[in-house]
Amino acid sequence: MLFSRHTLFRYGTSMVGSGFGHGIALFAQIVFARLLGVEDYGLLTLAFSFILLPSNLADLGVTASTPRFIALSIGEGDHAKARRVVWTTGLFQGATSVVLTLALIFWAPLVARWMDMPKLDRLVLWLAVFVPGVFLFRWTTSVLKGLGYNMLQVFLDSFVLQLFTLVVGLGGWLVMRSTLGVTLGYGGAYLLTGIVGAVGVWRALLVFPNPRVKSDLPFMAIVKHGIPMNITALVQTIFRRTDIIIVGAMLDAGSVGVYRVASSIAGSLKRLLTPINDFAVYKMSRYVGMKKSEYALNHYKDIIIFSLTLALPMYIVLFLFGEEIVVLLYKIEYVEAAPLLRVLVIGFAAFIGVGPMGELFNSVGKNWIRMIFIMCMSVVNLVLNIVLIRAYGVIGCTYSTTLSFLAIFVVFQLYMKRQFFEMKIDAAPFAQLLLFGLLLAGGFAVSGGSWLVRIPVALAACGLSFGAGVLLLWRSRRARVQEGAGADSPGAP
């Protein structure tokens, strides 16, 4: 079998939980977008963008590198070091969040004046108050991931946070009947989820071995490993958020709301598959710690095919029925998001494949190379955003995002062919994306047709895409058995 039963159970259970949680998140976005309207929803999106960018930068990559160092320490049998990673990173996150809160309170009026949006000042100011809650949430989920409590981490990240956001955000709206009420609800949701996560970490450490011996833990090693991951995560946030800021600066809050709707729908599938990458980095880091890099590489190859097999058929549906989906979920005033969605699904399809590649870089400690590539692409993305938004309006932002995601996917694959494990380029993901492109090209011809035409076309295209992925997985497994190497086989650790 391709994966062990235990692995399949954990993937499946977490994906169901993640899907349910992200369904709640999407539902919350829909509710708030409908309640606030295009302009105020755009303001809410801008406020979060101005909070998330400095938060990711101030983190210094500690959150991203914490799971790897905990998992490596456990793989090496050094439980004392694992405990020190937990507490050292926690103290750092707490101190950093307080300093950042003070800085953001000062920054809020400057942001509002720069964007020429007076309402933005108060939203950024109140969100800044909840930054410690955001850092607490990030720390607890990263620790739980490193300790191997992946299902609990996914439950917090994908379900508890989204449920609190919906409930507390709606409560804020009902009490205040304003964008500020929803904003306070979002901040309160992070704080409440962080508290729940802290309780989970405490209970996990109660049963974790405590040898009470001294163990060296150079904190700078965590930062050194984490900085490239931090910059990578920051650039990925830039892909999702800086384009929103540029749209707001060059156009208006209404355009931000429309673009946010399109990117949220396209990105929802990426978030649905997040548990796969979360488990992948834990398993691959353990394999590297056990000096079995070939197991990590085989796991990566299976995960990238598996992720694309699940995602591409759903993107075909979004491409063919984008307008109906946008109007059904949101309101007719958001219908301008449909053309943007058709462009974004192409880029996000490639971005699905980037996730497993990034986790493989993370597992073997090659994050500086990963960082350099993505930093270069971020500069290109920024320039393209400015040029294409000026030339084509808000849809120019989707062109820039899609081209950048495709470029990252290709560059990562080419680098891995030449340097990484001296491996041959894996043709399977390219084959899946090529077939996806051909199916979209065929579907575009009938995208303006009636339902009677598009439904059978969608069924046929989804069946071909999914069937091709299953075939590639089967061939990968068969080739591995013939070579006598099988990661995640029943006999694998």
Image: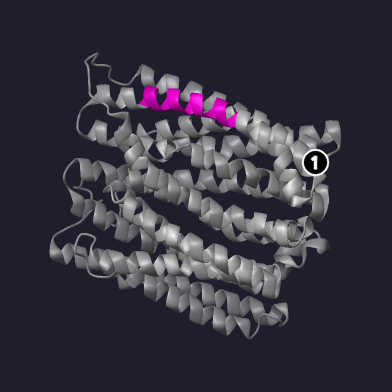
Locate residue 49 relative to residue 81 in the image: left or right: right
* Relative height, residue 347 to residue 464 (above, below): above
The quadrant in which residue 409 appears is: bottom left
* Relative height, residue 165 to residue 360 (above, below): above
Locate residue 166 relative to residue 401 in the image: left or right: right
Q: How many marks?
A: 1
Locate residue 348 relative to residue 296 in the image: left or right: right
Q: Quadrant of the C terminus?
A: top left
The quadrant in which residue 256 appears is: bottom right
Residue 444 point in image, percent of width and height: 62, 82
Looking at the image, which is closer to me, 152 or 111?
111
Q: Quadrant of the N terminus?
A: bottom left
Looking at numbered disc 1 in the image, what kind of residue is underneath it? Answer: Thr
Residue 271 point in image, percent of width and height: 53, 51
> Extreme left residue here?
484
Residue under label 1: 179
Within-10-Å neighbours for mark 1: few <14, some 14–19, many 20+: many
Residue 326 point in image, percent of width and height: 72, 63
Label 1, secondary structure: give it.
helix
Q: Who's the residue at 20% across and 47% down the image?
A: 492
Q: Who's the residue at 40% across and 46% down the image?
A: 229
Report if residue 99 lies within the magenta region: yes
Looking at the image, which is closer to me, 317 or 241?
241
Q: Overall secondary structure of the magenta stretch?
A: helix
Locate residue 408 relative to residue 56 in the image: left or right: left
The answer to whether residue 61 is seen in the rendering is yes
Magenta region, residue range:
86-101
